[in-house]
Image: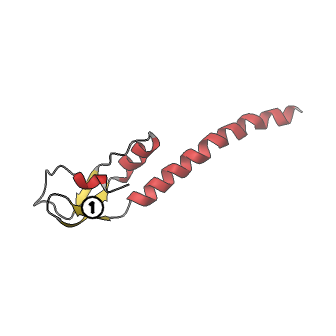
């Protein structure tokens, strides 16, 4: 009976860690590559790279805002409002 009681906290910890790790890995895999978006300012297609670390952190706390790491429209459109981030789900 005593050995069973030692496994209860372990199962509880695993029940918490597995969904958190799954969410983090899913977000990392989704945002690590370049994505194609429609640039709202230039009315053209653009390739953007989201900062995957920031995306994972924001996903873990339920946020939607992402941080661009690179954009194919930069440096011409540098300093834009980054409205294309609304297209990145």
Could you tell me which residue is drawn at 27 percent across and 61 percent down? 48
* Relative to 43, residue 8 above or below: above
Q: Position of residue 4 (x, y in %)?
A: 84, 36
Q: Position of residue 71 (x, y in %)?
A: 22, 60
Compare residues 84 and 12 and report the one nearer the observer: 84
Q: Which residue is mark 1?
A: 48
**SS for callout 1:** strand
Horizontally, is 42 left or right of 37 in the view?
Answer: left
Q: Quadrant of residue 38?
A: bottom left
Horizontally, is 80 left or right of 84 in the view?
Answer: left
* Label 1 packing within 10 angstroms: few (<14), some (14-19), many (20+): many
* Relative to 43, residue 61 above or below: above
Q: Position of residue 41 (x, y in %)?
A: 15, 58
* Relative to 53, residue 2 above or below: above
Horizontally, is 58 left or right of 79 in the view?
Answer: right
Q: Position of residue 85 (x, y in %)?
A: 28, 53
Could you tell me which residue is drawn at 37 percent across and 46 percent down? 64
- The C terminus, quarter of image: bottom left
Could you tell me which residue is drawn at 13 percent across and 50 percent down? 79
């Amino acid at each position: 009976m005593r050995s069973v009681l030692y496994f209860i906290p372990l199962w509880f910890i695993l029940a918490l860690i597995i969904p958190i790790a799954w969410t983090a890995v899913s977000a990392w895999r989704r945002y690590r590559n370049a994505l194609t978006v429609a640039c709202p300012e230039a009315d053209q297609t653009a390739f953007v790279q989201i900062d995957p670390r920031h995306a994972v952190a924001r996903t873990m706390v339920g946020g939607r805002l992402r941080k661009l790491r690179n954009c194919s429209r930069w440096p011409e459109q540098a300093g834009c409002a980054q409205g294309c981030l609304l297209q990145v789900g």
